[in-house]
Image: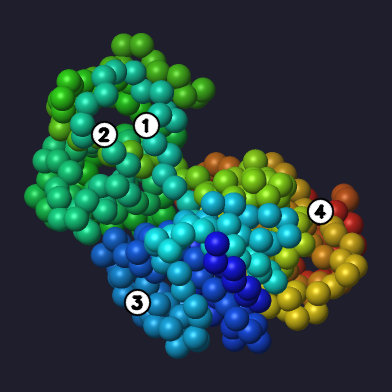
């Protein structure tokens, strides 16, 4: 077995992993390693040929592949070691990594460990849609990979279930490839995607988008021949008598993303059911000392730029932790997600922090409301918003003088 030792090891070579590694190196970390199970760095960005990346980070409008290229170049220039085609099998609380690649088993001891494993799409099995199991049912990310990396057209008559951003972007790309997009069905009364994607990918191309609607049956034997759409009530139950059949040869699923965190579960890191990621403090350190998390493995983001910004903070924090090796941690103030708030990060704040940013998604669509932060019954922050939508993340910036007692963040009419 090969034995290695690094100051910082980063698991995941997407934009989060590369950004965290570069920031850690810049902050003074010695030997930094990225472990990536694919044959290349860049993660899902490699199959994102559409633009909209880099506006905040590079002040340019880049495609996903261009964006990945910038980060890959930064990683090379920083002198960061990279192991691709390497699968991490296990991590421990002592920050020991067991991995495997073509050279066999590898054991790596890290001063600090950064989890940047990203997220995966929710598959058909999680939806329990009745019907047969024919070819032609796939996630939006799989369809994107087939089309942009493999050169295969997933189908010629397509129905999309869910209005997540990848599904919306693929709807537009299908139209540009002369594919008939029959409809986009969304079970909620609003879209879970960014407003700009609703406008640019759906409305501009006049693709039918049906809210309060889901697929209640898949038809076909060897290949999908059609799906049944039904309206749903306020409890998301199909309404009898509203069924209608759409002929199609493919059903594309864009029904949510799940953080990849099996390694953290193995290491006994406490997790947040609201985000699907680790419970972290404002340095992005988990409850297990020296293990940090960032990017979509921590909570699902709406923009890659925000993933990079967060991961850079996590990388700097990990480098500082390795350098100082604090024995006694500062007292922690708990941050609770109140009414109208989901996916709140961080869940804890170190007492004495100069400032902190909290990120969350609204639990529903709100109009003419306010975001409020409470310390006991006292409001320490409030901001009026004309519209809040679940498809977009929101940030709250607080000063350290506010941090005296546990906090609660909520959305109010």
Q: Residues within 10 Å of mark 3 (few under 14, many from 20)?
A: some
The disc, 3 or 2, on the residue closer to the chain's N-terminal end is 3
Q: Residue furthest left?
A: 178
Q: Vertically, is 151 above or below 262?
A: below
As helix, strand or loop, the secondary structure at mark 1 comes to helix
**Residue position marked by numbered label 1 in the rendering:** 124
**Residue position marked by numbered label 3 in the rendering:** 69
**Cα separation between marks 3 and 2:** 31 Å
Contact? badges 1 and 2 (CB < 8 Å): yes
Q: Position of residue 340 (x, y in %)?
A: 64, 43
The disc, 4 or 3, on the residue closer to the chain's N-terminal end is 3
**Cα separation between marks 4 and 2:** 42 Å
The disc, 4 or 2, on the residue closer to the chain's N-terminal end is 2
**Cα separation between marks 1 and 3:** 32 Å
* Residue 137 marker: 2
Q: Is residue 149 left or right of residue 116?
A: left
């Amino acid at each position: 077995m090969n034995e290695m030792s690094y100051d910082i090891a980063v698991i995941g070579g997407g934009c989060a992993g590369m950004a965290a590694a570069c920031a850690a190196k810049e902050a003074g970390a010695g030997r930094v390693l990225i472990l990536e199970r694919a044959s290349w760095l860049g993660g899902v960005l490699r199959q994102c040929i559409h633009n909209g990346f880099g506006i905040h980070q590079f002040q340019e409008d880049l495609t996903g592949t261009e964006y990945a290229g910038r980060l890959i170049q930064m990683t090379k220039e920083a002198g960061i070691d990279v192991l691709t085609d390497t699968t991490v099998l296990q991590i421990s609380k002592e920050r020991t990594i067991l991995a495997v690649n073509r050279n066999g088993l590898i054991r790596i001891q890290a001063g600090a460990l950064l989890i940047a494993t990203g997220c995966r799409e929710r598959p058909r099995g999680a939806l329990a849609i009745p019907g047969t199991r024919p070819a032609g049912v796939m996630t939006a990310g799989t369809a994107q990979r087939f089309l942009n990396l493999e050169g295969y057209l997933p189908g010629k008559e397509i129905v999309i279930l869910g209005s997540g951003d990848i599904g919306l972007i693929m709807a537009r790309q299908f139209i540009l490839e002369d594919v008939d997009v029959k409809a986009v069905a969304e079970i909620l009364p609003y879209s879970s995607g960014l407003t700009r994607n609703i406008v640019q990918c759906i409305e501009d191309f006049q693709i039918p988008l049906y809210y309060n609607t889901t697929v209640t049956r898949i038809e076909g034997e060897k290949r999908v021949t059609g799906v049944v759409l039904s309206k749903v009530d306020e409890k998301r139950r199909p309404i009898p008598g509203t069924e209608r059949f759409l002929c199609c040869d493919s059903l594309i699923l864009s029904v949510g993303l799940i953080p990849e965190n099996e390694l953290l579960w193995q290491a006994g890191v406490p997790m947040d059911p609201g985000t699907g990621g680790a419970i972290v403090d404002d340095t992005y350190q988990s409850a297990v000392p020296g293990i940090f998390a960032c990017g979509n493995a921590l909570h699902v983001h709406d923009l890659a730029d925000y993933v990079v910004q967060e991961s850079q903070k996590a990388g700097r924090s990990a480098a500082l932790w390795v350098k100082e090796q604090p024995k006694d941690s500062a007292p922690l103030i708990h941050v609770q997600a109140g009414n109208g708030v989901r996916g709140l990060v961080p869940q804890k704040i170190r007492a004495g922090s100069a400032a902190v940013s909290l990120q969350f998604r609204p639990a529903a669509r709100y109009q003419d409301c306010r975001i409020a932060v409470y310390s006991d019954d006292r409001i320490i922050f409030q901001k009026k918003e004309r519209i809040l939508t679940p498809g977009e993340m929101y940030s709250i910036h607080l000063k350290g003088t506010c941090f005296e007692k546990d906090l609660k963040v909520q959305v109010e009419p």
